[in-house]
Image (cartoon, rainbow, N blue to C red):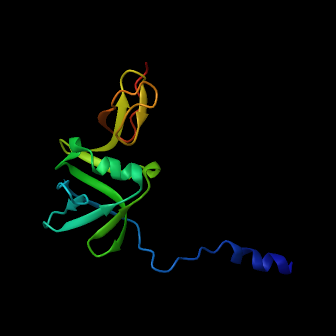
Amino acid sequence: MKRRAFLPLIFIPVAKGGESEKATIRGKLDQTAGNLPKLIDSSGKPIQLTGDEPTRGVLGDPRLKDADFEVSGHFTAPGSFEIDPIHTRSLFAYRDGKRLMVTYWCAICYIRTYTPGSCWCCQEWTDLDLRPPDAPDPKP
C-alpha cells in the first residue's frame, strides 16, 4: 500500500528550465540572399527562423519566397523562433485563404516527402505540393 502512495509522483511532468511555450506564428517568408530565413509578421517585425536540416531546406525553397507562411515551434529569444522538427508537420502556406501543408511530390514514383530535393527512387527533382493537412495521397 505504501508503494501506491508514491506511484502518482512518478508521472508528474517536470518542466525544463528555460523552455518556451509552443507557439504558432504567421507572416511573409523572407528569403533574402546571404541571410537566414525570416518571417515578417503583420506589424512588419522580422522573426529569425531556424529548425532541423529538413526544415531549413523548406525555408530555403525559392518556390516559397514571399509566401504567406505559418510555422509552429517556440521562441528561443525575442525575434528568434525555432520551428518544431519536420516530422511534426509544422510548416504551412496559405493560398487563396486556405491553410495548406507544405509537401513535395514525385509524380513519377508517387512518393511524398516533406523537404525539397531529389526523389530517393528516381532522382528527379520533387514538385512543391501544397495540400490540405487531411488530404489522402493520390493513387498510382
Percent across and percent down for residue 91 are 34, 50
Percent across and percent down for residue 136 are 42, 31
Q: Quadrant of the C terminus?
A: top left
Name the residue at the right extreme: 1
| Residue at 45% from the left image edge and 52% from the top image edge | 88
| Residue at 38% from the left image edge and 35% from the top image edge | 135
Above or below for 36 versus 88: below
Please name whichever residue, 55 or 11, is drawn nearer the observer in this view of the structure: 55
| Residue at 44% from the left image edge and 55% from the top image edge | 85
116 vs 4, left or right, is left
Above or below for 106 versus 43: above
Please name whichever residue, 121 or 39, is drawn nearer the observer in this view of the structure: 121
16 vs 3, left or right, is left
Please indicate, yes or no, whether residue 98 appears anywhere in the rendered image. no
Q: How many marks?
A: 0
Above or below for 136 versus 34: above
Name the residue at the left extreme: 44
Percent across and percent down for residue 67 are 19, 48
86 vs 12, left or right, is left
Above or below for 128 versus 35: above
| Residue at 40% from the left image edge and 49% from the top image edge | 54
Location of residue 21 (image quadrant): bottom left
Location of residue 49 (image quadrant): bottom left
Please indicate, yes or no, whether residue 92 appears anywhere in the rendered image. yes
Percent across and percent down for residue 20 are 41, 73
